[in-house]
Every structure is written in C-alpha cells, then in structure tokens.
Image (cartoon, rainbow, N blue to C red):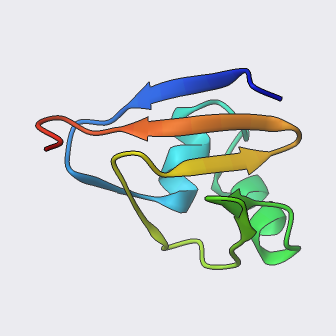
Amino acid sequence: MSNVEEITIRDSMIRLGQLLKLANLVEDGVEAAELIKNGLVKVNGEIDERRGRQLHNGDTVTVKGQTVKVIAPDAG
C-alpha cells in the first residue's frame, strides 16, 4: 500500500472529480461521481463524498486500492 503515485497539477488546487480523471483512476466524470457518491473515495484517509472537494499540495486520494498524491507548483 506504500505505492503512491504523484500527480502534478498546473495550479495550486484541483477538484476531486478532476483529479480522479487526471490520474486515470476513472474513465469519466460519471464514474467519478458514482464512486464519490457511494463513499468509495478517500481523501487523506477519510471518506469524502464531495466531488467538488478542493485538493491542495500533499493531499492524497485513494480509490480502488490505488493512492495518488497531489503535487502543486510553487508549494511552500
């Protein structure tokens, strides 16, 4: 479970649904919405049911046993 993929984003923030698509964890927004609505997505280790949840540098998202970490430009 220590296999965490880093996903670099362009801006300082990305929404949860967008990140799932960017990281290729879902095929499309419909799949992202379903997984989130059904409580199958964890943000920083806790279930989050908000598709518009803002993610920032260092946040982690886990879905389907895969974890990705958000890397934002100019963090710090």
How many numbered tags mark residues here?
A: 0
Q: Nearer the viewer, residue 70 or 34?
A: 70
Q: Nearer the viewer, residue 30 or 51?
A: 51
Q: Quadrant of residue 5?
A: top right
Above or below, comparing residue 72 to residue 50 in the picture: above
Q: Residue at x 13, y 44 (%)?
A: 76
- Kindly tell me whether residue 33 is visible in this rendering: no
Q: Is residue 13 left or right of residue 31?
A: left
Q: Is residue 33 left or right of residue 22?
A: right
Q: Quadrant of residue 50?
A: bottom right
Q: Quadrant of residue 37?
A: bottom right
- Kindly tell me whether residue 23 is visible in this rendering: yes
* Quarter of the N terminus within the rendering: top right
Q: Residue at x 61, y 45 (%)?
A: 20
Above or below, comparing residue 55 to residue 58 in the picture: below
Q: Position of residue 53 (x, y in %)?
A: 49, 72
Q: Residue at x 88, y 74 (%)?
A: 38
Q: Position of residue 41 (x, y in %)?
A: 76, 60
Above or below, comparing residue 25 to residue 34 in the picture: above
Q: Position of residue 22 (x, y in %)?
A: 51, 35
Q: Residue at x 20, y 45 (%)?
A: 11
